[in-house]
Image (tube, rainbow, N blue to C red):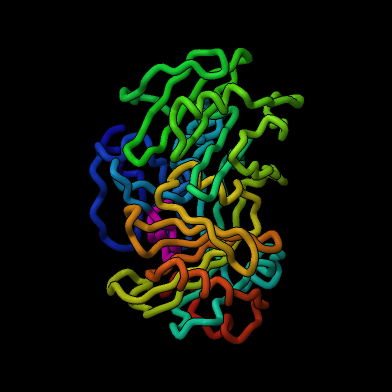
Amino acid sequence: MNEKMLATLAHVDVPQTAPALSSIEGRARAIRRGRHGRRFTVIGAGAAVLFAGGIFWPTTTTPHGTVAMGGPLAFGAAPAAASQDASCSGGFGSWVSRDHWASSPEIAASTSLITDTSLPVASVGVHQDDMNCAPIMPAAVFYATDPVRGISVWADVADPFVDLTDLTAQTVRGVAGQVRTYEDHSLQMSWVDPDGIRWLALGSAVAQADMVAILDSLVFSGPDGQTLDPASAPAGFVNDPVDPGPQSTTTRSWQVNYGDETFVEGTVPGKFLGLRATTTPSEPITVKASMYAVGTTFTEVNGELAMFVKNGPADAVSGWLLWERDGVTYRLISDGTMTEAVALANSVVTVPVTDPRVVNAPEYPLD
């Protein structure tokens, strides 16, 4: 990784200190947004920074640096096609005009508001990412809640270790592989199977030897040899079935920001809330446990499984909350505790785009 690559980590609307190059080499594949009116260039939309045009995308600080927690792309799970075609990890982002909201079934299903908050609605918006290639989905996801541990397995990926040197050799599933370890007890492991398919496994709070034993015991079948046999799932973990769903290169995300308008513009720090909702199929939220177990806590929102991820070191108080309901994936970020975030999430309701609270809210981007 070089300084030019570092510059692609993000373009945000506010100045912020860039993390040290040595602390993030290769691990963060974040986004780049070049503003041209309401259209953006997006590189690696699977990850992002805290602010991206008013959208709350969290980062987390670990002993090895600050990393984006937007998705698996931040940890090397890029589609294999990206190795042959660099444009595969790029695309365009744009803000969807309010005039088009009512005609979109995806927007109608995800338009939501937090009802139990005294903070005013600062802005609402719908962001659309049009990527050149469909996102990669994991082949398997396993997690444990007490203590929190996680493993995710990805097939047909690009080499996540290009230009990295802090690797060690590791035999995996009978072939030579490589592993990279991190100080927060997370690791990445990659190998190429006899059919020439590259695999990637992410593990957090799982010892390397245990990880290898689990990977060696997994059974995959199907036409592409990438469908997990549930009977081979490891003991002590919950197997979170992966529904690949209809793969799409387009994602539409409902955004609502609460707090002072000046804060949303990024000029005055203060009390804030951000809610994102999307119906686009994506990897299970439990994938996050395979990335950052020490900063993750399992909880519930309205009786459904939820995950609270610390926005900072493992001893931080604030963070962001993930949960799924009725085909919608929600992300709530606040400066409060997990208990406070769950209370807010319990009050989230779906509303029509004609709801007066939506109609009367400023549309993001703010003019």
Left or right, 64 with respect to 49, comes to left
Q: Nearer the viewer, residue 151 or 351?
A: 151
Q: How many marks?
A: 0
Q: Residue furthest right?
A: 223
Left or right, 181 with respect to 300, comes to left
Q: Is the residue 119 above or below the residue 222 in the image? A: below
Residue at horizontal 52 percent and vertical 25 percent from the top: 84
Q: Nearer the viewer, residue 49 or 15?
A: 49
The residue range painted magenta reads: 48-59
Residue 37 visible in the snapshot? no
Give coordinates of residue 330: x percent, y percent.
57, 62
Residue at horizontal 48 percent and vertical 56 percent from the top: 297
Which quadrant of the structure image shows residue 22? top left
Q: Is residue 189 magenta?
A: no
Q: Is the residue 343 above or below the residue 65 in the image? A: below
Residue 354 visible in the snapshot? yes
Give coordinates of residue 180: x percent, y percent.
38, 28
Rendered-image quadrant of the C terminus: bottom left
Q: Is the residue 212 above or below the residue 112 in the image? A: above
Give coordinates of residue 20: x percent, y percent.
23, 43
Residue at horizontal 49 percent and vertical 25 percent from the top: 190
Give coordinates of residue 355: x percent, y percent.
63, 83
Rendered-image quadrant of the N terminus: top left
